[in-house]
Image (cartoon, rainbow, N blue to C red):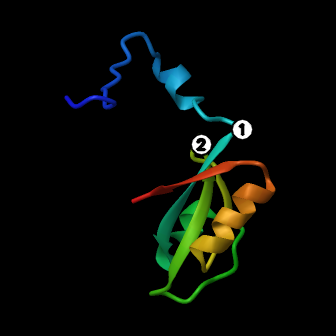
Amino acid sequence: MTEGNFAYEPTNVSPEALAHLGEGHIAYVKQVRSEDVPDLFPQAPKIAPGLKLFALHAADGTPIMLTDSREAAIANAWSNELQAVSVH
């Protein structure tokens, strides 16, 4: 281990508490395929297959918005006072 780097190993964090970390403060951007949209956003109109899209999700996984650019998803997070992180 080098100076300044450390590993945090939580020992007393319940699954319920873990699920609420970042709630109301953090959102994540995830690249999705247009084929996955009906499962994530049932109300979305039909989208052509084979497209690369970006979904913004609340920290608990709730879908917030869908867009065709990562930048638009991040801008939406910022406009809602959420810190955006990327998921690979």
Residue 31 seen in this snapshot: yes
Looking at the picture, tell me which residue is in the foreground, 40 or 11: 11
Screen quadrant of the N terminus: top left
Q: Residue furthest front?
A: 3
Give the percent coordinates (x, y) of residue 48: 55, 89
Q: In this rendering, is residue 25 above or below 5?
A: below
Residue 42 seen in this snapshot: no
Residue matched to label 1: 24
Is disc 1 in contact with disc 2, using a CB cutoff of under 8 Å? yes
Q: In this rendering, is residue 40 above or below 3?
A: below
State which tag comes first along the sequence, 1 or 2: 1
Question: At numbered mark 2, what does the secondary structure look like: helix, strand or loop?
Answer: loop
Q: Quadrant of residue 41?
A: bottom right
Residue matched to label 2: 59
How far separated are the C-alphas under marks 1 and 2? 7 Å
Amino acid type indicated by mark 2: Ala
Q: Quadrant of residue 76?
A: bottom right
Q: Residue at x 71, y 65 (%)?
A: 75
Give the percent coordinates (x, y) of residue 63: 64, 55
Amino acid type indicated by mark 1: Gly
Give the percent coordinates (x, y) of residue 87: 45, 56
Give the percent coordinates (x, y) of residue 42: 65, 65
